[in-house]
Image (cartoon, rainbow, N blue to C red):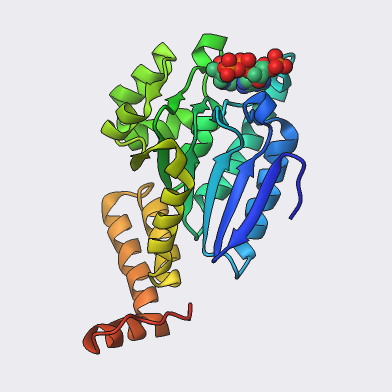
């Protein structure tokens, strides 16, 4: 896969995707959104890939937001189309049945934080700053931020971040549950790889089904979500991998999962 604004490399079943516009703090222009869309569509289907790490090029930013120069001059319908494009790309990432880990190296602002929120797990480097500054520009987060941030950190904290527009530090992001881990700068990608490796030792079908059980279940009424969980649990328990997992436990050896 070759893209102008995206680097993709796969090793040991982990794809490392790097948004590569460091001179613009990795701001997401239309071409980068389309590249992410194509890239994640392919990664979803790629049998060699079991997990994805998403990061930004350079020392300064993960992604400093949607490209403001693309936004300026849009009329209401153009801006709605722009929001829908971003939402489509981020939902594609969120709905992946492989774990996607955001490795946040610096600024994750606006669309950059919204991108990280669409990932399943987030690891921040010390010194990272995370925020939704859209109101400072006279607009609102339009790529899922008004919905995903309150679901993750609660309405009060999400509204404070949006209404003030002030970013939080990596440590504060960890304290409020916005990121899963904070690590020293030079260890970010290794920490993300370690997390990916841990997940990859588990049954791949179970990983995918778990991601879907949580994602769709959270949107359902509770009793319906429990019924959905039971169905998904039944589905995965009927696989060869589950039988292998049970056998390996009894035989006191590591399981060998085949994704069947
Ligand atoms: N859209 C378009 N261009 C952006 C951008 C964005 N979201 N964020 C940064 N850039 C560009 C700058 O315009 C500048 O371009 P130039 O060199 O052609 O002038 C370049 O990236 C470097 O940015 P600069 O502000 O000089 O870097 P910095 O390290 O001093 O500051 C930020 C980094 C992220 C704090 C600052 O760039 C910023 O506040 N960006 C906008 C964040 C934002 O409001 N995002 C929400 C958008 S909806």
Considering depth in this image, is 155 or 110 the residue closer to the camera?
Answer: 110
Residue at x 52%, y 50% (from the top left corner): 53
Quick check: can you spot residue 78?
A: yes
In which image quadrant can residue 160 be found? top left
Image coords of residue 196 (percent x, y): 44, 58
Residue in front for this viewpoint, 247 or 184: 184
Q: Residue furthest front?
A: 186
Residue at the image point whose x is 40% and y is 81% from the top: 241
The structure residue drawn at horizontal position 53% and vertical position 25%, both measured from the top left corner, is: 110
The answer to whether 2 appears left or right of 99 in the picture is right
Residue 82: x %, y % from top left: 68, 29
For residue 172, what is the image quadrant? top left
Q: Position of residue 74 (x, y in %)?
A: 73, 18
Taking the image as shown, residue 177 lies to the left or right of residue 186, namely left
Q: Is residue 211 above or below residue 257?
A: above
| Residue at 37% across, 40% down | 183
Residue 68 at least partly seen: no
The part of the image, by quadrant, that contains residue 203 is: bottom left
Ligand 1 resides in the quarter of the picture at top right
> Foreground residue, 98 or 186?
186
Tally the marks.
Answer: 0
Which quadrant, please, contains the N terminus?
A: bottom right
Horizontal relation, residue 91 to residue 167: left or right: right
Depicted 169 relative to depicted 20: above or below: above
Give the vertical position of 115 relative to 199 (above or below). above
Apparent side of residue 14 relative to residue 198 in the rendered image (left or right): right
Task: Give the image location of residue 242, x and y in percent.
Answer: 35, 80
Nearest the eye: 156 or 201: 201
């Amino acid at each position: 896969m070759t893209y102008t604004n995206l680097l993709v490399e796969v090793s040991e079943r982990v794809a490392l995707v790097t948004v590569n516009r460091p001179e613009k703090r990795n701001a997401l222009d239309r071409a980068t959104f389309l590249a992410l869309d194509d890239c994640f569509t392919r990664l979803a289907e790629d049998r060699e890939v079991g997990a994805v790490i998403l990061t930004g090029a350079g020392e300064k930013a993960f992604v400093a937001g949607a490209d403001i120069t693309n936004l300026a001059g849009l009329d209401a319908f153009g801006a709605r189309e722009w929001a829908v494009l971003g939402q489509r790309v981020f939902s594609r990432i969120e709905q992946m049945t492989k774990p996607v880990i955001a490795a946040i190296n610096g600024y994750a602002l606006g669309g950059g934080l919204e991108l990280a929120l669409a990932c399943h797990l987030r690891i921040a480097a010390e010194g990272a700053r995370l925020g939704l500054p859209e109101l400072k520009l006279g607009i609102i987060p339009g790529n899922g931020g008004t919905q995903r941030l309150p679901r993750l950190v609660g309405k009060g904290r999400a509204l404070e971040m949006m209404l003030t527009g002030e970013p939080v530090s990596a440590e504060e992001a960890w304290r409020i549950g916005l990121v899963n881990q904070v690590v020293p700068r030079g260890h970010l990608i290794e920490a993300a790889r370690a997390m990916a490796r841990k997940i990859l030792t588990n049954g791949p079908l179970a990983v995918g089904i778990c991601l879907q059980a949580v994602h769709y279940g959270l949107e359902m009424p509770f009793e319906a979500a429990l019924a959905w969980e039971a169905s998904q649990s039944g589905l995965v328990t009927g696989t060869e991998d589950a039988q292998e997992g049970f056998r390996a436990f009894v035989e006191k050896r590591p399981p060998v999962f085949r994704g069947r």
